Structure formats: structure tokens, C-alpha cells
Image (tube, rainbow, N blue to C red):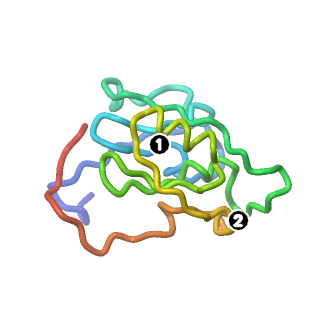
Amino acid sequence: CRTLGPDYRVHIYEFEEPGPMHIDTTILPLAPGRVLINKDWVPQIPDIFKDWEILNPPPSNLPDDHPLFITSKWIHTNVLMLDERTVVVEKDEEALISAFRKWGFETILCPFKHFQSFGGSFHCATLDVKRRGGLHRYI
């Protein structure tokens, strides 16, 4: 916390999952007051999200024989938010695309499932080099 400075708060949550996991396929804030939570891995919603809209993603449609290393089929939820309404989603994940559209998001479809085999997806494969706007607290 000292490295981040006084403007940042760190929230700790312990998961029941005994092994390592991608946090951004487990709990992923999408927009102010809206969070994607994988209820298979988070059976109890953290108190910090008690007033938030909880969006539960559908399972992936990746075939069982698709190679995945150091990750699970839930890697499809490792999406990238471009703003509060626009999300980049793997182009073959029809159920997730449909869910995002039902939830009111605009979707940008991109082929990325072969990258997922290496243990990440859009959120893991990108890095902000410059952001507009200021720091906001949503919790």
C-alpha cells in the first residue's frame, strides 16, 4: 500500500479456491456500480460489492479439447473495457456476447481464443500507457 500512495485503497478478499487464479476472470469491475463475478469461484459476494449490480457470466463455449495452459475455460471472461459501455470480447463466445448486449454493453468482437491457450486474454494482454480523467472511488 505504501508504494501505491495515500490515494489508493487495497481491499482484501480470500477465495475458497485453493489454487492460483486470474483475478480478472473471477471479479472484474466493468463500470461504476457494475461487476462481473464468476459465482463458480466466488460463492459469497464480497461486502464491498453489496450495492453493485452483479453480472454472472455464462460458461465458455470453448471445446473441451482446446489447449489451455495455466488457465481455465473461464478465461473468456478476461475481457477489456474501453469505457463504461464498450467491451472487447472473443468473437466466438456467443453466450457471453449475448449476455453483454443484454446487459446494455456495446461489444467489439475480436478473434483471440488461440492467445487464450497461453494463459491470458484481452485484459492480461494489454497495458494502459496513458489514461484520461482522474482517479475515482467506486467503493
Q: Which amino acid type is shown beneath numbered disc 1? A: Ile
> Where, by quadrant of the figure, is residue 113 drawn?
bottom right
Image quadrant where one finds the N terminus = bottom left
- The image shows residue 99 at horizontal and vertical percentages of 53, 36
Residue annotated with mark 2: 117
Residue annotated with mark 1: 27
Could you say which disc has been placed on residue 122 in the image?
none
- The image shows residue 12 at horizontal and vertical percentages of 39, 43
Q: Which amino acid type is shown beneath numbered disc 2? A: Ser
Query: Along the horizontal axis of the image, is 53 left or right of 58?
Result: left
Mark 1: give few (<14), some (14-19) or many (20+) Cα within 10 Å: many
- The image shows residue 57 at horizontal and vertical percentages of 56, 36
Tell me the residue at 64%/69% (across/down). 115
Above/below status of 116 relative to 50: below
> Where, by quadrant of the figure, is residue 90 drawn?
bottom right
3D distance between C-alphas at marks 2 and 1? 21 Å
Query: Along the horizontal axis of the image, is 122 left or right of 19?
Result: left
Closer-to-camera residue (33/62): 62
